[in-house]
Image (cartoon, coloured by chain):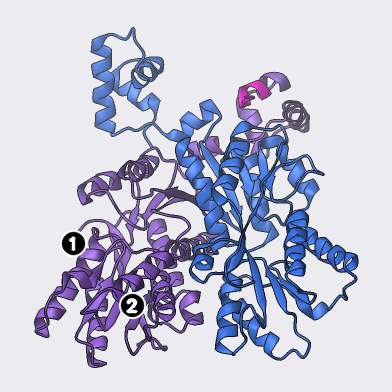
Chain colours: A blue, B purple
Amino acid sequence: MTNIRDIAKMAGVSVTTVSRVINNHPYVSEEKVSAVKAAIKKFNYHRNINAVHLSKGKTHLIGVVVPFSNHPYFGLLIEGIANAALDHNYKLVLIQTNYEETKEMEALRMLEDKQIDALIICSRICPWDVIESYSVYGPIILCEDSRNNKISSTFIDHYKTFTMALDYLYQKGHQQIGYTIGRQTGTNSSQRDAAYKDFLISNALCFEPNYIFTNRFDVEDGVNVAEHLLDMKNRPTALLVTSDQVAAGILTGCRENGLAVPDDLAIMSFDNQPISRVMHITTLEIPFFEVGKKLFQQALNGKEAAHEEVQVRLIERKTV
Amino acid sequence: MTNIRDIAKMAGVSVTTVSRVINNHPYVSEEKVSAVKAAIKKFNYHRNINAVHLSKGKTHLIGVVVPFSNHPYFGLLIEGIANAALDHNYKLVLIQTNYEETKEMEALRMLEDKQIDALIICSRICPWDVIESYSVYGPIILCEDSRNNKISSTFIDHYKTFTMALDYLYQKGHQQIGYTIGRQTGTNSSQRDAAYKDFLISNALCFEPNYIFTNRFDVEDGVNVAEHLLDMKNRPTALLVTSDQVAAGILTGCRENGLAVPDDLAIMSFDNQPISRVMHITTLEIPFFEVGKKLFQQALNGKEAAHEEVQVRLIERKTV
């Protein structure tokens, strides 16, 4: 690789002079400028941006950790962050983990190695103390309620939101309410589980373990939920579903098997993805653009821990 | 920022000695190792990966240009590339363009600046000569038929595929066939347009300009197509749809408005996304994993232009 010293030697000038010419510094004689430019052209030399980053300590890259890249929820989150990044001339480094802890560790090490300026973790696997230990190297931002920790976050209060949704279904006359969820672990899932149990207790309702469907991520998982419901003797009359994709699958499965929605089963979901608009699914809208913008701003602003709560909005359609 | 010279000064050793200690080189006295380690700890110094990249000329980052991050087609493509990258310990830098040429130029300049080792362009905007002029800086791989150019690609022959699909619909008795597409420009769209016109001519069918629906990307665009069809006097009996998302929207729109599928309208689409499985849409499967793997391999293998054709597979379901 040609470097600045080769150029200097070729042009018969000092390294400092080459640097001045490259950076359009004044006070360099025309003669030397010509010699340096000719040498640069001869070597087809281009500034190596890693050298620039090395001197400035900035990469203009922000890491984004997601479990899957092809899931619409994370796609919308990435799009939200990417649009904010576009406005500030930053690029995103996508780190897909498939929920493997070693992959999340690699992302943390990229921050340590200054390969990225900040790290946004959309769905965390590593324990809090590990995340905190890496926050000395640069801003780490999470997408979950971190108010009890020293890490910045943009989050939805899932306890509050789940409680609101369950109360809404209860007011519509439902007493047998179940829910579907993705991962069982993680802050968001724990908050939802706590809200569900508190709701049952405060309304003197029984806990039915088979009303809870875990590891449901995609439309096909939703179809399986519907098929499962058909076999149940005492099935729920309403389901709270944590993804529009799963809700679309449940709705399709119900229609194909003669379960009327909302009469036999009410469905209320999360996200307000395009599929929910098209299929008229009642959903709780997550403002992905706002979330992405806040996450990016926190990544940009630096190390002071900050917590930004984002509100969801109920969109009533035809499935409740 | 603390650098290696500060460490050397602090430890009272040469820069070379510090470098040897950092890289676990033998033949350094225990005394000097201790002094260097103490200085490193004192300064909380970490090797700056950009310095490593500068000396090795590699970043282990591959740029991926997509128009949108939240569209399932590009999501699946990113997932395919990301999985191949995971296996080789590479990370992806996502460059979202919203189909703006200036954003694609930024991606090309990242290659020039050595901020990435290679660039995969999933949907191109810049002209061929611009792309070619940047290929001196590193591998550029495209997702379109580039057999007439010096740029590597993994591609589907859309002329061949569209012809095959149109022939299939014709054999099923359809003579009034329309199609929906995203962008009108680009190699893939030109190939499809040529296949459509050649199909009409070879079967002595009339060209109906209002059978072609452009700028259709998402489920909601599909619903609009269905609503548009209702108002047409002489509507097509079959539609070839270039995305399962749009097909899902058309199918939903038809059901809500009393158009029977496939009796009133046959729908054949592309991708084999989960939504097509759930809604039983006849589709042409694109092997995203294989495409992603080939794109990544080409990015890794370097500058020799190569062209990898990928075959689609017809999956017969219930909409034709």
Residue B309 location (% of width, % of height) = 30, 72
Establish if B218 lies above or below B172.
above
What is the chain identity of the residue bearing mark 2? B
Work out whether residue A87 or residue A212 is closer to the camera in this orientation and state it.
A212
Instruction: Answer with left or right where residue A31 lies relative to residue A65.
Output: left
Q: Residue at x 27, y 64 (%)?
A: B214
Q: Is residue A120 magenta?
A: no
Name which quarter of the figure residue B247 lies in: bottom left
A124 or B139: which is nearer to us? A124
Is B6 colored magenta in this rendering? yes
Circle 1: element type: loop
Regarding residue A220, the answer to whether it shows in the image is no
Q: Quadrant of the C terminus of chain A?
A: bottom right
Q: Amino acid at mark 2?
A: Gln
As rendered, which of B24 and B77 lies closer to the eye? Answer: B77
Kind of residue indicated by mark 1: Asn
In contact (CB < 8 Å): disc 1 and disc 2: no
What residue is at 9 percent from the left and 79 percent from the top?
A: B201
User: Of callouts 1 and 2, which one flags the residue occurring earlier in the amino acid sequence?
Assistant: 1
The lab-note entry on whether marks 1 and 2 share a chain reads yes
How far across and how far down the image is residue B195, in percent?
A: 18, 74
Looking at the image, is A158 positioned above or below residue B133?
Answer: below
Q: Which residues are magenta?
A: B1-7
Q: Is residue A104 left or right of residue A44?
A: right
Q: Which residue is mark 2?
A: B311
Dot 1 falls on which chain?
A: B
Q: Position of residue B115 (x, y in %)?
A: 44, 41
**Residue that carries the numbered disc 1 in the rendered image:** B148
Circle count: 2
